[in-house]
Image (cartoon, rainbow, N blue to C red):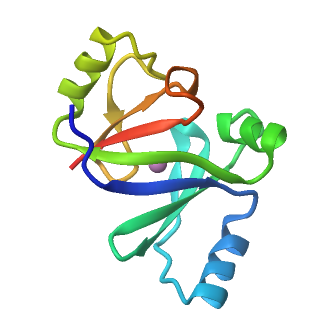
Amino acid sequence: MKLDKIEHIGIAVKDISEVSRFYKDVFDCQISEEMNVPDRKLRIAFTDISGVKLEFVMPTDKESVVAKFIDKRGEGIHHVCFEVDDVEKATAELKDKGVELVDDKPRLGAEGKKIIFLKPKSTHGVLIELKER
Ligand code: CO
């Protein structure tokens, strides 16, 4: 499989409004509407920086995996998302190559595109998200 560009970098945050304000004030970024992702117990917002986005990811419940991430490691870079042609095909290929996935099959992300996450222990420490173009 071929990775296309970095689609976004996910940043775990405690207070999404405060972070949005920071990026607006300091870097003059335009921030998207905040979106809830109820099945993951998350609230997210994006900012686009010349085609590479930052995704602010705030847990809405202390049981969220991102809440656990912040508890353990603090706020900061959480995942890197690459664009690929075909997430179903990529998933099959990853399974063939023995790469461990967070979910068994792709699901729809907040923007309605297919996504899959690769476990960091399979990727030398980086939580990788693949997103369909
Ligand atoms: Co993401």
Direction from residue 106 to residue 45 in the image, left or right: right
- Measured as percent of width and height from the top left, residue 15 is found at 74, 63
At 42% from the left and 75% from the top, the residue drawn is 49
Q: Nearer the viewer, residue 2 or 129?
A: 2
Q: Is residue 84 toward the left or the right of residue 61 in the image?
A: left
Residue 81 horizontal/vertical position (percent): 41, 47
Q: Residue at x 54, y 58 (%)?
A: 44
Foreground residue among 40 and 51: 51
Counting every numbered tag in the picture gives 0
Tell me the quarter of the picture where residue 38 sits: top right
Q: Is residue 105 left or right of residue 25?
A: left
Residue extending farthest to the front is: 124
Rendered position, 59 above or below 87: below
Q: Position of residue 9 (x, y in %)?
A: 49, 55
Viewport quadrant of the N terminus = top left
Q: Is residue 8 left or right of residue 37?
A: left
Question: Which residue is pictured at 65% across the width and 89% down the height?
Answer: 25
Residue 61, percent from left and from top:
73, 42
Q: Is residue 117 above or below residue 43?
A: above
Residue name at image x 83 percent, y 40 percent = 71
